[in-house]
Image: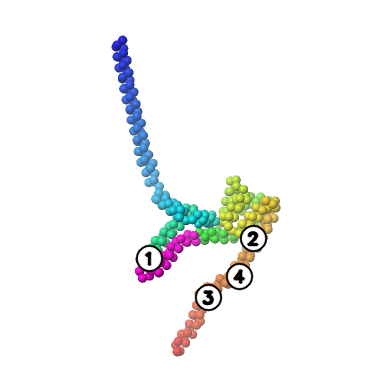
Amino acid sequence: MLITLIMLGFFGTVSLAALSFAGRARTSVMASRIAEFRNRTASDEDYGPDLDIAFSERVLKPTLESLARLVSRILPQSVLADVQQQLAQAGYPMRFNTFLSFWAVSIFGCGSLALMIFVSAPGDALIQKVLAGVLFVFLGFSAPRMWLKGKVKTKQKAVILALPDTLDMITTCVEAGLGLDAALARVAEKGEGPLAEELQRMLRDVAMGKLRREAMTELSERVCVEELTSFVNSIIQAEQLGVGIGQVLRVQSEQLRTRRRQRAERTAHEAPIKMLFPLVLFVFPAFLAVILGPAAIRIVQAF
């Protein structure tokens, strides 16, 4: 009996020691694997892929985004909303944050030039240095906005020029039996320029589930052209009142052709007035110098 108890105790002690050793070995193996995984993650994933990314993505892009956030915090919300609206009217030549970064770089660059001029110029010309600094700062602040306004005006002029012919094509398609959406799609597919792109965007909005009157209203707000706004309002009213679309399109087409003719006549009448200032400033002095120059020389020689 005593021998049996001794054997059972010895067997239990050996078993517990074996289990404890196995548990420690398993724990040490698991701990080593976790440590290896952490080291591998830190070395391969945190630092390795960043070296493969371009310098512009790692440094320049975060810097420009920080500048954009800084400018958005400094400027009033009304100015930011105006910039956002002008970007939409211009067809988004660049993103909103990119434009803010470009604006900040322009102000900083022109301000640096103004500071360099102020430091390097002689101390006697204090007024000239201050005027030059104010001029450079104003140029850096207003140049991006002027560029954006120029983009908006260029797009609006292109839309105004293309709108009469586009509306004639839409009228022809509708009178040939196509629906308004199909006619707009056909004209947008065959056309080129900003107006065709805006029509394609409007049709994509309609295809995604937006009401056509809402999509057309957003189209007129994006382009902000009086003739296009009148056309959109006429289409929406015709749908609400149940008037035939073909008749409305025909009337709008005639009105646009009349406006185009009146615009051309007004431009022709304004041409002599616009030519007056270059003639007075540049052409007439040259004529006077050529005509009166020899006479003035003879008069001087005679006396």
Q: Residue at x 42, y 61 (%)?
A: 110
Mark 2 and mark 4 lie on one chain; the one further toward the N terminus is: 2
The secondary structure type at the circle numbered 1 is: helix
Quadrant assignment for the N terminus: top left
Residue 134 vertical position relative to residue 222 in the rendered view, above or below: below
**Is any atom of residue 98 visible in this view?**
no
Q: CA distance from mark 3 to mark 2?
A: 37 Å
Q: CA distance from mark 1 to mark 4?
A: 48 Å
Q: Is residue 194 left or right of residue 301?
A: right
Magenta span: 117-146
**Picture coordinates of residue 237, whole percent (x, y):** 67, 53
Mark 3 and mark 2 lie on one chain; the one further toward the N terminus is: 2
Mark 1 and mark 4 lie on one chain; the one further toward the N terminus is: 1
Q: Which residue is mark 4?
A: 269
Characterize the local packing of mark 3: few (<14), some (14-19) or many (20 or more) Cα atoms within 10 angstroms. Answer: few
Q: Which residue is mark 2?
A: 256
The secondary structure type at the circle numbered 4 is: helix
Q: CA distance from mark 2 to mark 1?
A: 55 Å
Q: What secondary structure predominates along the stretch shown in magenta?
A: helix
As drawn, the label of residue 68 is: none
User: Is the residue under label 4 in contact with that under label 2 (CB below 8 Å)?
Assistant: no
Q: Which residue is mark 1?
A: 118
The secondary structure type at the circle numbered 2 is: helix
